Image (spheres, rainbow, N blue to C red):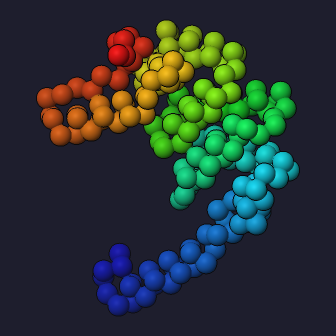
């Protein structure tokens, strides 16, 4: 719409300026200062960060923010209730479109190594629907030490440039070497 004329261009520039002026404070609940507090290790910000993790919460820049949150949660001192909530959130990533924060979540899951989570993943990998089962298989492969993000990205890359190639993404059914 900004290419229609000078008035549309000005309106677009004003909208962009307003967005950038407010984005810093709208990026994280409570504003930029609370985001900095979380990044510095303030345990009071853990609940807010956990509430932002579900894959349904998606807006400009949220993927980058979730990557940081998953990374920080690996070594945070969490209660049993928080760990159960995070496991539930991590399992919900299997039902959604693959985004960048999936890989951070998988590194978190491997690092924490919680048995109830992995039992659920094994069940899904053996009985789930195709996309969900594939992602569960990726998590199991990541747990066994395979650089799964690289493997999946290479499959997508090859399929992008070779129209006859069908990516092999069900790594639970096909052994990974």
Q: Image check: 94 left or right of 79?
A: left
How many labels sit on residues?
Answer: 0
Q: Is residue 21 visible?
A: yes
Quarter of the view holding residue 79: top right
Horizontal and vertical percent for residue 160? 22, 39
Q: Image check: 144 left or right of 21?
A: left
Quarter of the view holding residue 166: top left
Report the residue at 39% width, 89% height from top. Answer: 7
> Quadrant location of the C terminus?
top left
Horizontal and vertical percent for residue 69? 66, 46
Report the residue at 27% width, 27% height from top. Answer: 167
Report the residue at 45% width, 37% height from top. Answer: 98
Answer above or below: position of 143 versus 101. Answer: above
Answer above or below: position of 12 versus 176. Answer: below
Q: Is residue 57 visible?
A: no
Horizontal and vertical percent for residue 147? 43, 29
> Quadrant location of the N terminus?
bottom left
Horizontal and vertical percent for residue 26? 67, 65
Quarter of the view holding residue 51: top right
Report the residue at 69% width, 37% height from top. Answer: 74
Q: Image check: 84 left or right of 173?
A: right
């Amino acid at each position: 719409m900004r290419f229609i004329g000078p008035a549309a261009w000005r309106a677009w520039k004003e909208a962009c300026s307003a967005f950038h002026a407010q984005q810093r404070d709208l990026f994280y609940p409570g504003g930029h200062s609370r985001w900095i507090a979380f990044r510095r290790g303030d345990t009071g910000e853990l609940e807010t960060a956990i509430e932002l993790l579900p894959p349904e919460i998606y807006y400009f820049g949220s993927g980058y923010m979730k990557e940081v949150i998953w990374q920080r949660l690996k070594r945070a001192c969490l209660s049993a209730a928080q760990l159960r909530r995070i496991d539930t959130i991590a399992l919900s990533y299997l039902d959604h479109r693959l985004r960048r924060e999936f890989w951070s979540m998988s590194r978190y899951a491997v690092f924490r190594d919680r048995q109830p989570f992995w039992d659920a993943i094994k069940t899904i990998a053996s009985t789930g629907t195709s996309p969900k089962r594939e992602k569960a298989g990726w998590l199991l492969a990541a747990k066994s030490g395979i650089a799964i993000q690289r493997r999946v990205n290479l499959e997508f890359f090859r399929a992008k440039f070779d129209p006859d190639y069908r990516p092999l993404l069900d790594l639970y059914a096909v052994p990974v070497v």
